[in-house]
Amino acid sequence: MENENVESNPSPTLPFFLFGFVVFVIGPVGVFAQMQIGWLIVPWYLLILETFGVLLMAVSVVQNGGWLRYVGIAPFVVATGFIWYVMIVASPLAPYDGPAQVGEKLPAFSAKLAGGEQITRSYFEPANNDGKRSIMLFYRGRW
């Protein structure tokens, strides 16, 4: 009797599912780290990582099927859908209707620079700025 070497190949879909899970988890960990260091930007990487992670898990499910994989991927699909909803639909910025309007003179104000110097509207006038015009850019973020 011959001794046949039968190699048992692990399922190629398991690495897809596990790698998808790891990629999925990196997103929330990144948001937590971002909050801890005070880096207040919109975490678009969260959408990308979670979506890519779910897609990798979906490849595993399609290749190998099985009810356990379908049940296992469901919470991740729901969580990713919720994050898409919150980031795109539920967090729109309200239209700006404040006193500063495009093409109009800057309203009177006073503020402190980072060095503690007090500034007012006159700080930006050409007479006080070596005859140069100034542009103020207001950025409205989501944080």
Image (cartoon, helix red, strand yellow):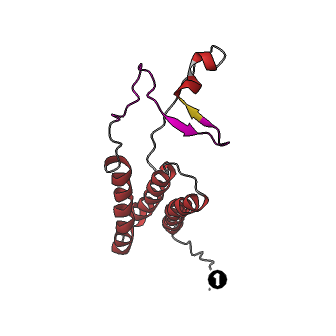
In the rendered view, would you say 132 is above or below 18? above
In the rendered view, would you say 101 is above or below 16? above
Magenta-highlighted residues: 96-118
Of 1 and 55, which appears nearest the observer? 55
Of 28 and 56, which appears nearest the observer? 28
Q: Position of residue 82 (x, y in %)?
A: 34, 58
| Residue 46, magenta (yes or no) | no
Q: Is residue 135 left or right of residue 74?
A: right
> Residue placed at 62% from the left, 79% from the top?
4
Residue tagged 1: 3
Q: Would you say the magenta stretch is mainly helix, strand or loop?
A: loop
Of 16 and 74, which appears nearest the observer? 74
In the rendered view, would you say 21 is above or below 44? below
Q: Position of residue 105 (x, y in %)?
A: 44, 21
Q: Under tag 1, what secondary structure?
A: loop
| Residue 113, magenta (yes or no) | yes
Q: Is residue 13 left or right of residue 86?
A: right
